[in-house]
Image: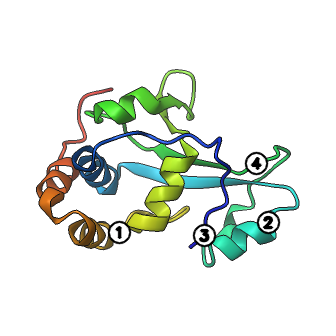
Amino acid sequence: MGYVLTKRAMDIETSEQELCYILGYLAAPGRIKYIEAQVPYGKEHMFTNAYPGANYDEMKITSDKQSFQFRIILNYNGNCPIALEKALTNGGGPFYKNCISRGRFVERIINEYGFKFFDAPNAEVIRNLVNRKHPVFIKDFDEGYHVPLTGRC
């Protein structure tokens, strides 16, 4: 995996413990609709080199913007962690805050925690990576993973 975003890309600042909870929350089945990448015209090769096998041919989301934009579109944002709630914007219509447009955060969870563009999260892979990197906080991942799909942010 690679990194293509500029330093201007935004992140979600969390503690390690909060991050593990958020990763569990996002890894839960049905939570993420998809993770998209908008690739500037002329930079497709840069993207495919940085993210081989990222289904770019299926995405074909190109943009007239000058920089890459990565987003997570949620199917459901119920009971979301506070750090995510603060980052949510309208991405699926004016009445539903379901878009996380913090590119640095998206790039980090793809490169470091096994999330993939346009693929459903593989919770087992993600949990194993969290357990390897943050074994003290695996219980937080599990807690976030089991947050019910009820309520609203």
Above or below, comparing residue 9 to residue 151 in the picture = below
Instruction: In the rendered structure, find residue 2 and report the number of the disc placed on it.
Output: 3
Image x and y of residue 100, in percent: 50, 39
Q: Amino acid at mark 3?
A: Gly
Which residue is at a point 16% across and 51% down the rendered structure image?
140
Marks 1 and 3, Cα distance to the nearest angstrom? 20 Å
Q: Which residue is mark 2?
A: 44
Question: What secondary structure is found at the residue carrying circle 4?
Answer: loop
Which residue is at a point 79% across and 71% down the rendered structure image?
45
- Looking at marks 4 and 3 on the same chain, the residue that comes earlier in the sequence is marked by 3
Q: Which residue is mark 1?
A: 122
- Looking at marks 4 and 2 on the same chain, the residue that comes earlier in the sequence is marked by 2
Question: What secondary structure is found at the residue carrying circle 1?
Answer: loop
Above or below, comparing residue 61 to residue 51 in the picture = above
Marks 2 and 3, Cα distance to the nearest angstrom? 14 Å
- 6 sits to left or right of 87: right
Quarter in which the N terminus is drawn: bottom right
Return the residue nearer the eye: 2 or 73: 2
- Looking at marks 2 and 1 on the same chain, the residue that comes earlier in the sequence is marked by 2
Marks 4 and 3, Cα distance to the nearest angstrom? 15 Å
Q: Amino acid at mark 1?
A: Asn
Q: Amino acid at mark 4?
A: Ser
Assess disc 2: are there few (<14), some (14-19) or many (≥20) residues with their C-alpha within 10 Å of its C-alpha.
Answer: some
Q: Using the rendered image of the protein, determine whether residue 15 is visible from the camera's viewpoint.
A: yes
Marks 2 and 1, Cα distance to the nearest angstrom? 26 Å
Q: Using the rendered image of the protein, determine whether residue 29 is visible from the camera's viewpoint.
A: no
Which residue is at a point 32% across and 57% down the rendered structure image?
27
Q: Which numbered mark, 4 or 2, is in the foreground of this view?
A: 4
